Image: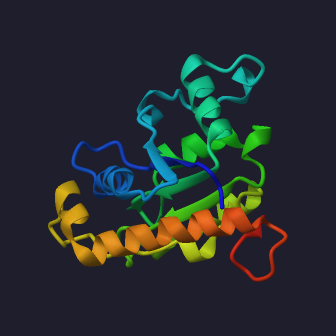
């Protein structure tokens, strides 16, 4: 059992009314001890990825990298745009490609719209290419599109809150067991 377990949550949407961002805020409220969830709010200020800046990354990139390095795991919730991942999440991941602490970082992928399978597949492929450790039991699809639930509604819904808490516990448990544990729950790369 891990004494504390810190998850950094990344939303692929910058919209004020984003379902994905609301989901991550609700998740932070529902996280059972010893789990904490921190929604990262700085993705909108990241500059467009430019490899020329790798030797001296801009301050927003350094803030992202610091947050990723100190997290025990990542949680990504991102919408689908034109059958692909959002530019926001792609830009974020581009800044993490050569960042050593990201390699083998445990990641849960959440999908707030089960019909958004193209982006979910593309995100998983990108994460595998970057050698992230995708935790399948913690990667869930929560049918929120059209459910008319805001952050409070997600917290108050037994179905949604139950799925959130179960996925968080699955992420915690998979990381506590480590990548050498038997079974497909912690797949590197």
Where 129 sits versus 146, above or below?
above
**Which residue lies at the image location 33% right of the left edge and 58% below the top edge?**
23
Q: Position of residue 93 (x, y in %)?
A: 62, 45
Q: Position of residue 103 (x, y in %)?
A: 77, 49
Looking at the image, how many numbered discs can be counted on the residues? 0
Residue extending farthest to the left is: 148
Q: In terms of image quadrants, where is residue 144?
A: bottom left
Where 173 sits versus 72, above or below?
below
Q: In terms of image quadrants, where is residue 129?
A: bottom right
**Which residue lies at the image location 42% right of the left edge and 75% below the top edge?**
141
Residue 123 visible, this orientation: no
Q: Residue 6 versus residue 145: which sits nearer the camera?
A: 6
Residue 110 visible, this orientation: yes
User: Horizontal placement of 188 versus 72: left or right?
Assistant: right
**Which residue lies at the image location 45% right of the left edge and 39% below the top edge?**
40
User: Horizontal placement of 163 versus 119: left or right?
Assistant: left
Q: Position of residue 24 (x, y in %)?
A: 37, 53
**Which residue lies at the image location 17% right of the left edge and 63% below the top edge?**
153
Q: Residue 156 versus residue 79: which sits nearer the camera?
A: 156
Q: Position of residue 130 (x, y in %)?
A: 74, 54
Q: Residue 177 versus residue 87: which sits nearer the camera?
A: 177
């Amino acid at each position: 059992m891990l004494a504390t377990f810190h998850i950094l949550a990344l939303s692929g949407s910058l919209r004020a009314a984003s379902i994905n961002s609301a989901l991550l805020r609700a998740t932070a409220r529902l996280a059972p001890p010893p789990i904490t969830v921190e929604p990262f709010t700085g993705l909108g200020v990241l500059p467009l990825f430019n490899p020329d800046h790798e030797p001296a990354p801009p301050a927003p990139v350094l803030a992202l990298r610091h947050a990723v390095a100190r997290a025990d795991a990542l949680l990504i919730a991102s919408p689908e745009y034109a059958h692909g991942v959002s530019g926001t999440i792609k830009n974020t991941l581009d800044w993490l490609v050569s960042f050593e602490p990201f390699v083998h970082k445990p990641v849960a992928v959440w999908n707030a719209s089960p019909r958004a399978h193209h982006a979910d597949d593309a995100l998983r492929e990108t994460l595998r290419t970057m050698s992230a450790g995708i935790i399948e039991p913690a990667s869930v699809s929560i049918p929120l599109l059209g459910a008319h639930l805001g952050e409070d509604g997600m917290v108050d819904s037994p179905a949604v809150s139950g799925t959130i808490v179960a996925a968080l516990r699955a992420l915690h448990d998979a990381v506590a067991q480590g990548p050498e544990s038997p079974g497909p729950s912690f797949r590197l790369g």
